[in-house]
Image (spheres, helix red, strand yellow):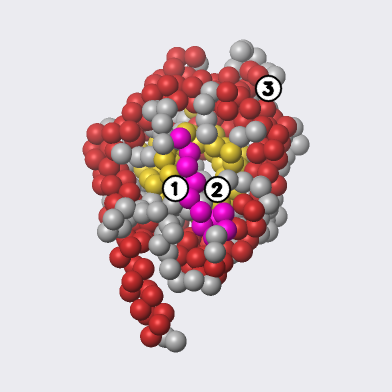
Amino acid sequence: MTPPLLLQPLTIKGVTFRNRVAISPMCQYSAIEGVAQDWHLVHLGRFALGGAGLVMVEATAVEPRGRITHEDMGLWNDEQARALARIADFLKANGAAAGIQLAHAGRKASTHRPWDGGGPLTEADAVSGSPWETLAPSALPFSDGYDTPKAMSTADMGEVILAFREAALRALTCGFDVVEVHAAHGYLLHEFLSPASNHRTDVYGGDRAGRMRFPLEVVQTVRAVWPQDKPLFVRVSSVDYAEGGLTLDDTVAFAKALKALGVDLVDCSSGGNEPFGPQVHPGYQVPFAAAVRREAGIATGAVGLILSPEQAAQILDEGSADLVFLARKALDDPNFALHAVEALTGEFDYSFAPAPAKSGLDRLAGPLKRLKAEAG
């Protein structure tokens, strides 16, 4: 029996994903000086062992100013690269493609971890460390209580572009298969894209083309150093959920421009540029992925409360996306991809899913089949 698309391999450029289950970048706020710890190896490694086709490392700051918190992952020095290389090696040795999301938090930087209360750091803070100056397209704070960010000069933009370039080169040395540029969730590149946060009057603001200029310069720089046979993704917030904010038409236009620069897939999320969000429900962001795929003619990833193999399979079968990205459901069930095989095919044989010899998938298949037989 031919398996559903969800369980079939997908090849983008020179990378073949053994299935179309991707694990979204999920911030862990557990790095030390930007360096990944054993926590990250275990957190991410279990998804590779669970059969996912692509495992993405969390939002990884390209420079210290780009961190959300002091405990964010970073990729601006060689120590950080060595720790991430260990993770990339493990993911690939166990059958998953290894991806990393490169990010800059912009005006939403310099905050507490969620379990330390969230919100902006202050000089008097003794728990999370000292605050730092934040950057944004315009001097507009994210919300009440946040510091007013510095409106970026062209020199500041040049420094950030260089930081993205150097991080992409380090990601290559780490052995990652996929790089994703983070242009969503109210962070720096999204701030430039949205008219709600970009009030500039120079060539980097104003109309849609002006607001897209800096994010496109970042992506173009990353594409120039990221090998042509390796996929480049961009995560976007498809809409802002606020009057005067980013619209789906804006996002489709941005996706068309990304395609022209050689981006391979647009990962379609939403919101984050304001302190409130939508009423969520299963699959609430899938229509954005479908619209961008249809209207921009580019591969898309669907994300947002994708909770079952049947739902994930339907998204792909209907042509709404090319990959499904899981977060909360993957935390609940890191073996989602393996369980999807049985749910969608009635089989307990994962041999159709390409994986390296002696991969985690190969090692798990025999014992799991035996346990299944013993359980009747």
Q: Image quarter for residue 155?
A: top left
Give the numbered dot on residue 208: 3
Residue at position x 38%, y 51% in the image: 96
In the picture of the structure, the residue carrying the numbered disc 1 is: 17
Q: Earlier in the sequence, mark 2 or mark 1?
A: 1
Question: Taking 80 as reference, is 178 left or right?
Answer: right
Q: Secondary structure at mark 2?
A: strand
In the picture of the structure, the residue carrying the numbered disc 2 is: 323
Viewer-closest of 352 and 210? 352
| Amino acid under disc 2 | Leu
Residue 106 x/y as whole percent:
50, 32
The answer to whether residue 18 is above or below residue 154 is below
Q: Secondary structure at mark 1?
A: strand
Residue at position x 51%, y 20% in the image: 217
| Amino acid under disc 3 | Arg
Which one is closest to the eye, mark 2 or mark 1?
A: 1
Which one is closest to the eye, mark 3 or mark 2?
A: 2
Residue at position x 54%, y 37% in the image: 265
Q: Are marks 3 and 1 in contact (CB under 8 Å)?
A: no
Q: Earlier in the sequence, mark 3 or mark 2?
A: 3
Q: CA distance from mark 2 to mark 1?
A: 10 Å
**Span colored in magenta:** 3-13
Residue 307 x/y as whole percent:
58, 62
Q: Image quarter for residue 338?
A: bottom left
Crowd band around label 1 with a 10 angstrom C-alpha radius: few (<14), some (14–19), many (20+): many
Q: Earlier in the sequence, mark 3 or mark 1?
A: 1
Question: Taking 237 as reference, is 131 left or right?
Answer: left
Q: Are marks 2 and 1 in contact (CB under 8 Å)?
A: yes
